[in-house]
């Protein structure tokens, strides 16, 4: 059974800092790894999807990597801004078409 | 483009009451999902559907029912509401390929008292 873990549960950084959010998964037989952003009281917004055959994906200041052999994915945020404050969730999708979510990392970027 | 629309946004139920959470999407997605999100517990899959007329149980289906009569709509039915069903419910959809991201609605916050 796939399990997805995100550490730390919360992270606070000053504005402008580069940061890395971590995601680990137990079953390396995943089809993709997805990163989402959730603002308070809102649904999840898809940020990046890394296919199993890929090593990384980039969108603006965001870069996500995937290492299936070690069961790890990272989300790198460059030059963080207060508007980046949100909860970030990762999810692994396997053969059952169902995503298994981590519990998320709550990020606070202080001005 | 509305995406995934959920109604209502908030609802308070008394124990034993029933209700239906509505979800509709306008992206012609085949796959639709219902998740519940509890504080500190992440998202748990309740039910999902891979197309009209097809539904399947997720991780936590007890106390819920779904139907999928059209591609667009995927309502979630709560029968005999219990305090344990107090949660935020999210509907999501995708094209269903391995490379298609999920699109989420804004959620329904349900309180059962």
Image (spheres, rainbow, N blue to C red):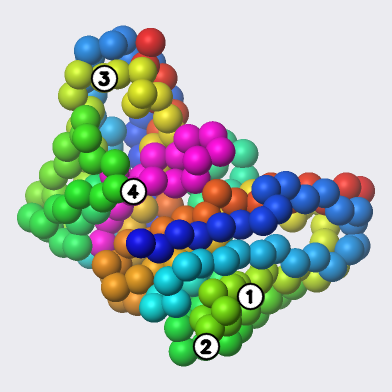
Choose top left, top right, bottom left or bottom right for residue A96.
Answer: bottom left
Residue wearing tag 3: B81
Q: Main secondary structure of the magenta part?
A: strand
Residue at the bottom extreme, as displayed: A53
Q: Are marks 1 and 3 in contact (CB under 8 Å)?
A: no
Question: Which residue matches tag 2?
Answer: A54
Relative image position of residue A70 (x, y in whole percent): 57, 79
| Element at label 3 | loop
> As drawn, is B45 to the left or to the right of A71?
left
Would you say residue B106 is visible in this rendering?
no
Pinpoint residue B72: horizontal percent, then vertical percent: 22, 53
Q: Mark 1 lies on which chain?
A: A
Point out residue A71 in the picture as x, y percentages from the top left corner: 54, 74
- Residue numbers of the magenta segment: B31-46
Label disc, if present, on residue A64 of the rendered structure: 1
Task: Indicate whether residue B29 is drawn in magenta.
Answer: no
Q: How far apart are marks 1 and 3 (CA)?
A: 40 Å
The disc placed on residue B45 is 4
Using the image, determine if residue A90 lies above or below residue B35.
below
Same chain letter for marks 3 and 4? yes
Alpha-carbon span between mark 1 and mark 4:
24 Å
Residues at discs 1 and 4 both on one chain: no
Q: Pointer 1: residues within 10 angstroms few (<14), some, or many (20+)?
A: many
The answer to whether dots 2 and 4 both sit on one chain is no
Are discs 2 and 3 both within one chain?
no
Q: The residue marked by circle 2 belongs to what chain?
A: A
Distance, label 3 to label 4, CA atoms, is 18 Å
């Amino acid at each position: 059974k796939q399990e997805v873990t995100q550490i730390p549960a919360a992270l606070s950084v000053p504005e402008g800092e580069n940061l890395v959010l971590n995601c680990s998964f137990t079953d390396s037989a995943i089809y993709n790894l997805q990163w989402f952003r959730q603002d308070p009281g809102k649904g999840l917004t898809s940020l990046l999807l890394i296919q199993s055959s890929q090593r990384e994906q980039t969108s603006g200041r965001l870069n996500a990597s995937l290492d299936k052999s070690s069961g790890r994915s990272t989300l790198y945020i460059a030059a963080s801004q207060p508007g980046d404050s949100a909860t970030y969730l990762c999810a692994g999708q396997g053969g059952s078409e169902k995503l298994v979510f981590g519990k998320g990392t709550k990020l606070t970027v202080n001005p | 483009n509305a995406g995934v629309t959920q109604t209502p946004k908030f609802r308070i139920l008394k124990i034993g009451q029933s209700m239906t959470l509505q979800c509709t999407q306008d992206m012609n997605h085949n796959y639709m999902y219902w998740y519940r999100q509890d504080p500190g517990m992440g998202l748990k899959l309740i039910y999902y559907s891979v197309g009209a007329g097809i539904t399947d149980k997720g991780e936590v289906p007890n106390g819920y029912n779904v139907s999928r009569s059209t591609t667009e709509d995927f309502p979630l039915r709560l029968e005999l509401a219990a305090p344990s069903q107090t949660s935020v419910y999210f509907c999501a959809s995708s094209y269903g390929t391995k490379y298609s991201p999920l699109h989420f609605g804004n959620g329904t916050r349900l309180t059962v008292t």
